[in-house]
Amino acid sequence: MTETTQAPAGPVSLSLVPKAEAKQSMKDFKSDQEVRWCPGCGDYAVLAAVQGFMPSLGLAKENIVFVSGIGCSSRFPYYMNTYGMHSIHGRAPAIATGLASSRQDLSVWVVTGDGDALSIGGNHLIHALRRNVNLKILLFNNRIYGLTKGQYSPTSEIGKITKSTPMGSLDNPFNPVSLALGAEATFVARTVDSDRQHLTSVLKAAAEHPGTALVEIYQNCNIFNDGAFEVLKDKETAAEAVIRLEHGQPIRFGTKGVVRDHESGDLRVVDVTPENEADVLVHDAHRETATTAYALSRLADPTTLHQTPIGIFRDVERPVYDTLMAEQLDAAVSEQGEGDLSALLAGKDTWTVVG
């Protein structure tokens, strides 16, 4: 690969990432490494979707970086013909933050799993979200620890029987979308590994978003948690289980719709009739506050997964950390002239040790 080109500091967007000199195809983003996941793993579908939509961004692949932590999904960088790093458990957001903040000419992606991101990596994840670093975080959620052979994870439902919980899990599971919204993430979405069209559309929207974008991807582990999301994938059950969120459209699915309870303020699902049709909520992904988006995220029952929203919950603009930091650095240089790193590290309060 050729060397990347440093872009000047400025507003963080795809416009700062150098464009590809020639038209690219899916093949250009496939590495020469053998893809090694269990046969039938949902990771294959996600990899194919990412490799397939990357050419549409028109970015030089030398200026795209994938950073992962530890887990089955974290093999991802090996299979992308871009720059990448297989880092340490839970720390991918921290490493990617340093990279994105210092190199605004890069499109930086984090690939992580429900165990990697929400257990040991929980603090790193929420701080990247609240800072609004220019990262795109793909959180593969299979509700199990796959790499270490089937222990329960932070998203496993209560009562989950696994090798580490033979009598059933006692832990209340995380809802990754709720967690991200609570951390004031500016872009939060959920999609499913087997829905290629929906997955691709969400990934494109995330790529174009200035700031942190978190995409939770329901991903099947056919070895240790097979069928965990079958109710959302089976044609006979999906119509009454999947709530497809589209900005500006009524939140309806099958014969049902989502309304706000006037007494409690909570959201609830009702059978739509001519009498209550006007009460069905219209989805607003750009609403400044995350209150309604959070309420939507709580509709999914962690055990049955009936009435599960997918799509973009929130997409709002807020100052991007990388840009704010660059502006401070520029201001410091303009006020003080050339920066002196040694003076900065030493400060005004130093000691001389005499031997």
Image (cartoon, grey):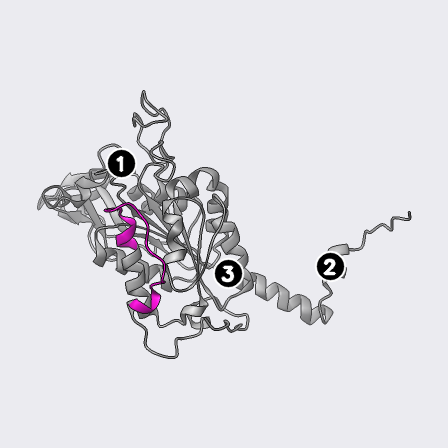
Residue nearest the observer in this picture, 46 or 242: 46
Dot 2 amino acid type: Leu
Dot 3 amino acid type: Ala
Point 63% across, 68% down: residue: 330
Q: Secondary structure at mark 2?
A: helix
- Specify which label sits upstream in the sequence, 2 or 3: 3
Q: Which mark is residue 225?
A: 1
Q: Secondary structure at mark 1?
A: loop
Magenta region, residue range: 27-46
> Dot 1: few (<14), some (14–19), or many (≥20) neighbours within 10 Å?
many
Q: Which mark is residue 100?
A: 3
Q: CA distance from mark 2 to mark 3?
A: 22 Å
Horizontal placement of 170 versus 242: left or right? right
For the residues bearing labels 2 and 3, Cβ distance under 8 angstroms: no
Residue nearest the observer in this picture, 244 or 74: 74
Find residue 38 and report its image quarter: top left
Q: Secondary structure at mark 3?
A: helix
Q: Which of labels 3 and 1 is toward the front?
A: 1
Q: Which mark is residue 91?
A: none
Q: Residue 251, percent across and down?
A: 20, 49
Q: Is residue 136 above or below residue 301?
A: below
For the image shown, how many numbered marks are present on the structure? 3
Q: Is residue 59 above or below residue 315?
A: below
For the residues bearing labels 2 and 1, Cβ distance under 8 angstroms: no
Q: CA distance from mark 3 to mark 1?
A: 34 Å
